[in-house]
Image (cartoon, helix red, strand yellow):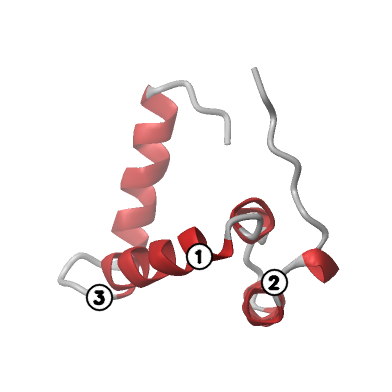
Amino acid sequence: MTITRMLDLDELDPTFREAALRWQAAGGNVNMHRVFGQMPEFFQKFVEFYGPLVNHGKVPLRVKELARIRVANLNECDY
């Protein structure tokens, strides 16, 4: 199985590096930035799609995260 290398933050496109550093300063995990940073066009489209799903709507973010963790657990996904 191929394992994708995570880029160092200084290897990221400047726009994504700034976003990753802001996320990290807020206590977030930047591994998604480090993996998808290898495909900046895809990552940009993903952020445009995923951002509104996570940050808007009637379901609170906490509930969305709990659901995501539960689904990962049911699928035996360690990360």
Q: Quadrant of the N terminus?
A: top right
Residue 70: percent from left, percent from top:
37, 36
| Mark 1 or 2, nearer chain start | 2
Disc 2 crowd rating (10 Å Cα; few below 14, some 14-19, many 20+) is few
64 is higher (above) or lower (below) than 24: above
Disc 1 crowd rating (10 Å Cα; few below 14, some 14-19, many 20+) is few
- The amino acid type of the residue labelled 1 equals Glu
| Marks 3 and 1 in Cβ contact (< 8 Å) | no
Q: CA distance from mark 2 to mark 3?
A: 21 Å
- The amino acid type of the residue labelled 3 equals His
- The amino acid type of the residue labelled 2 equals Gln
Q: Quadrant of residue 71?
A: top left
Residue 60: percent from left, percent from top:
27, 67
Tag 1, which secondary structure?
helix
55 is higher (above) or lower (below) than 50: below
Q: Residue at x 66, y 72 (%)?
A: 20
Residue 62: percent from left, percent from top:
36, 61
Q: Residue at x 62, y 79 (%)?
A: 19
| Mark 3 or 1, nearer chain start | 1
Q: Residue at x 62, y 66 (%)?
A: 28
Query: Is 76 left, or right, of 3 in this rendering?
Result: left
2 is higher (above) or lower (below) than 42: above
| Mark 2 or 3, nearer chain start | 2
Seen as rendered, the residue at the extreme left is 58
Q: Relative to the observer, which residue lies in front, 1 or 62?
A: 1
* Residue bearing the label numbered 2: 24
Q: Quadrant of residue 10?
A: bottom right
Query: Is 9 left, or right, of 18 in this rendering?
Result: right
